[in-house]
Amino acid sequence: MNTDGDRSIAIVGIGCRLPGGIHGPEALWRLLAEGREAPPDESVTRPWPGRLDPHDRLIEDVDAFDAGFFGIAPREADCMDPQHRLLLEVAYEALQDGGLPLVLGPHVSTGVFVGTSTEDYARVVASANRNDLLGWVGAARASAAARLSHHLRSSGPSLVLDTDRSSSLTAVHLAVRSLREGECDLALAGASNLILAAHTGTAFGAAGLLAPDGRCRFGSAAASGFARAEAVVVVALKRLRDARAANDRIYAIIAGSAVNHDAGRSDDFLTPSAQAQCAVIRRACADAGIGVHELRYIEAHGTGTPVGDRVELSALAALPRYPAALRLTGSVKSNLGHTEAAAGLVGLVKTALMLDHRRLVPTLHTRPISSAVDPEAIELVADIRPWPDSDGPPYAGVSSFGLMGTNGHVVLTALSTGWLAGPENHGRSADGQEGRQGAGHEDGPAHLIPLSARTPEALRALRSAYVHMLKAADDPPELRDIAWTAACRRDHHPFRTVLTARSLDELLAALTRDDRGGEDNGDAEALVELTRRYEAGENIDWVAAQRPGRTVRLPAHPWLHGRHWVTDEQGSPRAGACPPTASSADDQDPEAWTRAQVTAAVAQVLGHVPDASLPLSDGGITSLMGLELRQILMESTGVELDTTFVYEHPTIDAVCRHILGRRARQPGTPQLDDDLDTALAMLQQHLGPDECERLLHAELRELTEERTHEENV
């Protein structure tokens, strides 16, 4: 395999939410390495429909979402499928894990590939009588990828696909192809599987597919079915050449992938085919440029159903293997349950982490071993152990097979330099230097560590997260690498601070004291000036300002969650919103009356009232909601509004002025005081001279067009 070309794809970032409170790849690795199982959590409840199967493994707080971070109005967030909301957050966590900003710039095309196969929330929306377009868009499956592409501001490929259980691995396959073809420079391959209704589980239970004890026992004679589980997973992918050039942290390399179907090889629509499974693994290995015998480990689909296990184990036994060695295999479903549409991606993340740490982790509940396991061909990994030795690079396969017959397989390997250097050496710094420095001593050079967040509350939470990282880590990142990653591999938000430190101890002290650290210790005037400019909101060329370092994992931007779940809006707007009234303004202050109508309409549409001088788009209004706002305002004020009026008048203040002006020109409407100087001063104060000039030109053009129309008539 040529690891220097464009065919090899690097996994550079991972984000995940899994049962058992697993939040991120580090937490997942601890669970796997300790041989633990995420138990069913009977305390997890849902706003609707209440209790699900007690064996389901659920993610907590699926109604929690930081709508403000993404600029989404609360009312719109209520309508969004929780799978889409969590995908937004987990995708951003994957980007931060990889040291990649949310928006990479106009010259970087990002592709989004999402696998999902359930639309449970559509039932919730329907039960709430939300038959409007906002409810339809919020529950539409296509929104899962489209929203993510929108917030990335990327025009790269954006698609949602459903191949049942193999959906997520098929998404990875298409992402790999897109990167190889140059359609995108960064790809986010993700999957979501939330259990928001009981009907699917009821059908599985009636068919005898669910394990009575709620455990997936792959390869065991006691296998009796699977337990359903939730997962939201996203991986960030780049061409290996590009990842190396950017000095990205690399978990593992995707060397090859393939998909096929059971058609023609199975007697029944829902019966798996060993021949098709062998064929897809061979094709993936051919795509990677290796022989099947070079796969030392295969992460099996491994559901724990008697029929599925028998077919898959017979296929694995039929494949050629490494000389004088058993085929090593296992299934993450024994730890987490069956995450269905996300299952393949969960297995891929597990395998990438094993390559990253150079360890195999145990598969649980395999005893007693099934008679379908050929002891002379297959070994189920039942303990944690070093990765097996081989003559060349380590290769592993990941399988995912859909109930409807679509099979996927991905071949992974390790970056050879990282493999030889050891599990903790994930790449050199940008200047090629290695070695620890700045752990506890205060005689090193001063480093600037910029921290930023979307809100003051989030910035305080971020400081606390850094404190927790430094105190909890047995081997925390080096100070230089923290400074490099925080400055050069993070988004920079409006609320900012810069800490100065010469050691990790000094950084911890600065974080704890809530001060800037070493400013009083004789730091160079240039550092103080750089801090001042950054905290004033200036864009800093941190790559030029910082000493080169490695990209390391740092705390992600904290989420400030609100609760969002669709409710019946017929006759009862969201709390805090008052329906506008069409009462007459003749006997009232026209300006106050107009502002009351506009404010009430905005509250009804958005679910809250943003600052009157800020763009409504910052409050979460979309083109769809703009049309809804237009309709409400036309009914309440009696003024005809253009369909694009929100774009021409983007703030509450501007909308009020526009409606006041239109009412003043209507026959029989009391005329308002047209003090031009006062109006211009107010416009410039709120919008600035450029926006003021644009709006005046728009108004003059509108007046001219009306006058011309009247003369022609």
Image (cartoon, grey):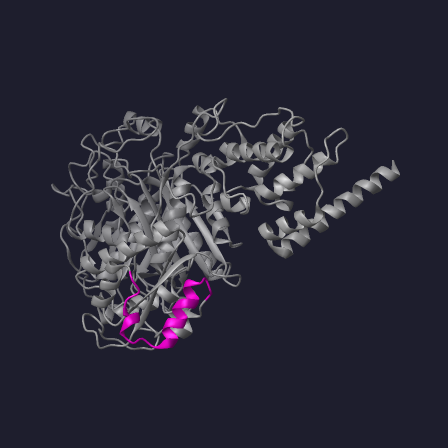
105 magenta-colored: no
User: Residue at (62%, 48%) from the top-left corner?
Assistant: 682
In front: 129, or 54?
Answer: 129
On the image, the x and y values in percent for residue 328 come to 20, 54
* Residue 83 lies in quadrant: top left
- In the rendered view, does 460 fall on the left or right side of 599? left
* Residue 401 lies in quadrant: top left
User: Residue at (21%, 39%) from the top-left corner?
Assistant: 216
* Residue 191 lies in quadrant: top left
On the image, the x and y values in percent for residue 626 come to 58, 38
- In the rendered view, does 596 fall on the left or right side of 514? right
Where is 576 relative to 18, above or below? above
In front: 227, or 484?
Answer: 484
Q: Residue furthest top?
A: 571
User: Residue at (34%, 75%) from the top-left corner?
Assistant: 547
User: Residue at (26%, 57%) from the top-left corner?
Assistant: 353
Where is 112 relative to 637, above or below? below
On the image, the x and y values in percent for residue 287 come to 39, 60
In front: 659, or 77?
Answer: 659
On the image, the x and y values in percent for residue 677 come to 69, 50
Where is 518 relative to 293, above or below? below
Magenta: main secondary structure = helix
- Which region of the structure is painted magenta? 515-539
Viewer can see residue 280: no
